[in-house]
Amino acid sequence: MLLRIGRIIIGRATGTYMNRWGIPDWLGKEVRARDKACIYCGTPMIEQMPLHGPRSAVATWEHIINDANIITRENIARCCAACNSSKGTKKLSDWLQSPYCKKRGINKGTVAEVIKAALSLGEFQDKRDKGDYAQDTFQRPL
């Protein structure tokens, strides 16, 4: 159960502070330290929109896999408002093929390591779902 006080959410069972997207404070700090620049385009980000400036470089929270229930360091990241707006709810691999990414030179080789890891996992899952890999390929060795 969660308790909301303004923009602050507190998990009653754990006493953990969370932001309005349900990201625990400890994870938010970790991701902020990791993602100083946009994980997609590499633009240095700012925390607040300038009074008379564009909002495109403002840091936003990103769910790499578009599922708000997956709140892990592998799925939560920071990206600029421009990339977040363009990606929306698109699947990551599809978005990387979009005109937006092509125009800006965003591709599998230019994104941050957290995105490269998500893409690798996604490729394995796609191949497994198609039957290209045996199920035991994904089990950890003892």
Image (cartoon, grey):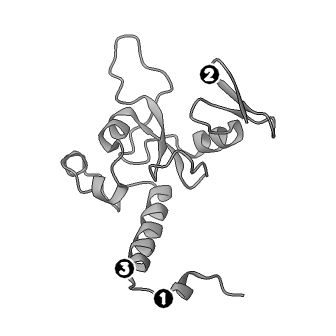
118 or 52, nearer to the observer: 118
- Identify the residue at horizontal 41%, vertical 76% (top origin): 129
Q: SS for tag 3?
A: helix
In the picture of the structure, the residue carrying the numbered disc 3 is: 130
Q: SS for tag 1?
A: loop
**Amino acid type assigned to the residue bearing label 2 in the image:** Arg
In the picture of the structure, the residue carrying the numbered disc 1 is: 134
Determine which of the numbered discs, if any, sits on residue 62 in the image.
Answer: none
State the image coordinates of residue 93 (x, y, percent, origin top left): 33, 60
Cα gap from disc 1 to disc 3, whole angstroms: 10 Å
State the image coordinates of residue 62 (x, y, percent, origin top left): 47, 42
On screen, 17 above or below 123? above
Few, some or many residues within 10 Å of mark 1 (<14, 14–19, 20+): few
Q: Quadrant of the N terminus?
A: top right
Answer with mark 1 or mark 2, whichever residue precedes in sequence: 2
Cα gap from disc 1 to disc 2, whole angstroms: 46 Å
Few, some or many residues within 10 Å of mark 3 (<14, 14–19, 20+): few
Image quadrant where residue 122 sits: bottom left
**Amino acid type assigned to the residue bearing label 3 in the image:** Lys
Does residue 41 appear to the left or right of 59 in the view shown?
left
92 or 109, nearer to the observer: 92
Q: In which quarter of the image is the C terminus?
A: bottom right
- Identify the residue at horizontal 44%, vertical 86% (top origin): 133
State the image coordinates of residue 79 (x, y, percent, origin top left): 44, 40
State the image coordinates of residue 105 (x, y, percent, origin top left): 25, 51
In the picture of the structure, the residue carrying the numbered disc 2 is: 7
Most extreme residue toward the top, as rendered?
A: 51
